[in-house]
Amino acid sequence: MGQTALMLMIVTVLSKMFGFVREMVMGYYYGTGDIASIYIVANTIPVIAINIIAIGISTGFIPIYNKAKKAEGILAAEKFTSNLMNLMLVFGTIMIVVCMIFGKYFCLILSPDLKNNPKLLDTAVKFTRILLFAIYAYLYSAVFRGYLNLKGNFVVPVTTGIIMNLIIITFIVLSGIRENYYLLPIGALLGNTFQYIFMPKTAHKLGYKHRLKIDLKDKYIKEMLKIALPIIVSVAAGELSLLVDNAMTSAYFGNDKISVLNYSKKLLGIITGVITVSVTTSIFPIISDLASSGKIKQMKRHINSSVVSMLILVVPSVIGIMALSTPIIELVFKRGAFDENSVKVTASIVFAYAPYVLFQSISDVVDRSFYAAEDSKTPVKIVLFQQIINIFFNVIFVHLFGFTGIAYSTSLACFIGSCIMMYAFRKKFGQSDLKRLAISSSKILAISLIMGVIARLNYGFLSSHLSNTISLLISIIVAACFYGLALLFARIPEVMKTVNKIYHKFKR
């Protein structure tokens, strides 16, 4: 794994730790009740919907900036950046006005059960309208994020979460102490806005100069939209599965169960946030440059190596969380309003959702190769198909498994989607040493499964003699030590390469 990805993981771990504390504080004061659920619903529009657009813009921005720079020089690329920034802020204003008007209907779509409680619906709408102004921050940060990554600055974009979480944690505590629910969306707005406070200054130091000019005829804007729009559709389709899960949960099991899904996703999101995002963020500028230079063979090798590196960390994390889901939820959330029943329900959802994280991580790494080659249609088709079958499985699994059926259906649909993505990758780019990838993946999976059994048995034995917390920590440490040693003996190329680098550094 590259040093950039490793550095990003370290910084992201710190950010995610603060995010984890935020969820713990939220669970303490509001548990899995209605206020926690409508707060999640209110966050959906600015944080998820607009973030989808932001991801599309930041992903499409990088290859087009490189294209403008190579074709017309750095000045043309910088003008394109300023123009894009201005257009994003205009678009944000339009979005805020539309969402202000139709906020009530958006809330009902996201949580149909709110129609049975007008008071909660009114609170959800007010929460949403407060949070809408975070749209500006998400849109301008999308451009700056891509710009900073291009200039080799990966740290500032990932440190934003630390600032955001500190602000939100403060307001959750104030809200709980003063029993003022409206401090929740106010804190979220301030956190989501001020997290990006250092981006403009850092971009300026790297040479960015903003120009107050809008050019709708800019050919590079048009080219970027050709890439960004399908990415937006693809990411939106990916998020749609989680939104569908929320809506169906509200319709079948009540509004309060949405918070259970949220706590589960936040816990599992640590894996994707720390590992998957770090890998995809660090490799995309590299493979984009390789693709634009016609070095497809090198790009394929880079993708394969990145998939293995990602699996080395994601697979044991997923298996470990599945094996110890109940004690982990107890340790993290069981306090205050988060009672024994909340633990039981949340742990079952975490277990069912965990495979989704693994399969989505594979898709997230592989689909970057299509975006780098300016083919955004293929991932969109795959993800849309994945969401169609997810909805189909949702309807069936809810009746077969109840509440956990929602999570199982999402995991199964994502597995099918990742398989299709790998097949499409091979079909488009040709042979890519899938045999070596399959052998490495099989070794990682086998070692991780044994590790999971060891962790579970170890915890079962220790918990009858020691406290749950100590038993959990010892079980995790023993399992991690076994996994690390077994990985060395498995002689996976990516592992051996990293070990050799470390050895030679110490030797010098």
Image (tube, rainbow, N blue to C red):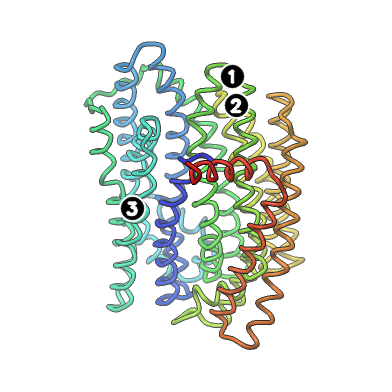
Between 311 and 31, the residue placed more toward the observer is 311
Q: Residue at x 57, y 23 (%)?
A: 373
Question: Disc 1 vs disc 3: which is toward the camera?
Answer: 1
Mark closest to the chain's N terminus, 1 or 3: 3
Query: SS of the residue at dot 1?
Result: loop
Say which mark, if any, is on residue 192: 3
Q: Is residue 218 left or right of residue 419?
A: left
Looking at this view, name the residue that lies furthest to the top: 72
> Which residue is denoted by mark 1 in the rendering?
295
Q: Residue at x 66, y 57 (%)?
A: 485
Residues at discs 1 and 2 in contact (Cβ within 8 Å)? yes
Q: Is residue 502 left or right of residue 206?
A: right
Decide if residue 371 is in sight here.
yes
Query: SS of the residue at dot 3?
Result: helix
Question: Alpha-carbon neighbours of circle 2 within 10 Å: few (<14), some, or many (≥20)?
Answer: many
Relative to 251, does residue 389 appear above or below in the rendering? Answer: above
Disc 2 residue type (three-letter) = Met
Disc 1 residue type (three-letter) = Lys
Disc 3 residue type (three-letter) = Asn
Say which mark, if any, is on residue 299: 2
Q: How many angstroms separate mark 1 from mark 3 (CA)?
A: 39 Å
Looking at this view, name the residue that lies furthest to the front: 507
Quadrant in the picture for residue 251: bottom right
Number of numbered labels in the structure image: 3
Q: How many angstroms separate mark 2 from mark 3 (CA)?
A: 35 Å
Residue 329 screen position, x and y as percent:
55, 73
Q: Residue at x 70, y 49 (%)?
A: 413
